[in-house]
Image (cartoon, helix red, strand yellow):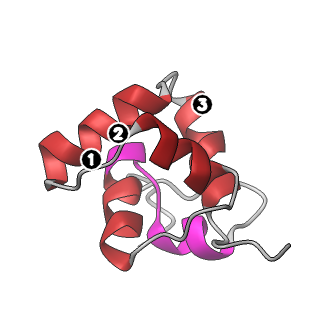
Amino acid sequence: MARANVCGKRIKLLRIHREMGQVELAAALEVDFNIKSSQSDISEIERGVRGVRDEEIMAFAKILDASPMWLLFGKKQPIFNNDPLEH
């Protein structure tokens, strides 16, 4: 079965690194970006079952303090928004 997204595993990695639950991440999407999402939506994204819209990628990047490019393409280490080497 083909994956519906390429960034789910990296979203999960950062969410866990930030000690954030799926429910908390869904709530942050709604509160901060007016994106309605449930815990099951987050689970499906992380498992690669559900696609991710471009505005969701940008929201995940802001909430998880990561580069949208890293979420999409990855590297060995995440590039965080406050990384001075990123600019």
Where does the magenta region start and end?
63-73
Label 3 close to label 1 by CB (< 8 Å): no
Secondary structure, magenta segment, majority class: helix
Residue at screen point 22% across, 56% down: 35
Q: Earlier in the sequence, mark 2 or mark 3?
A: 3
Q: Where, quadrant-wise, is the N terminus in this rendering?
A: bottom right
Specify the label residue 75 is tagged with.
none
Q: Quadrant of the C terminus?
A: bottom left
Of 7 and 74, nearer the camera is 7
Please give left or right for residue 3 compared with residue 51 in the image: right
- Residue drawn at x 42%, y 45% as measured from the top left: 64
Q: Nearer the viewer, mark 3 or mark 1?
A: 1
> Circle 3 — which element?
helix
Asked if disc 1 and disc 2 are in contact, CB closer than 8 Å, the reply is yes
- Magenta-drawn stretch contains 40: no
Foreground residue, 72 or 83? 72
Mark number, residue 29: 1
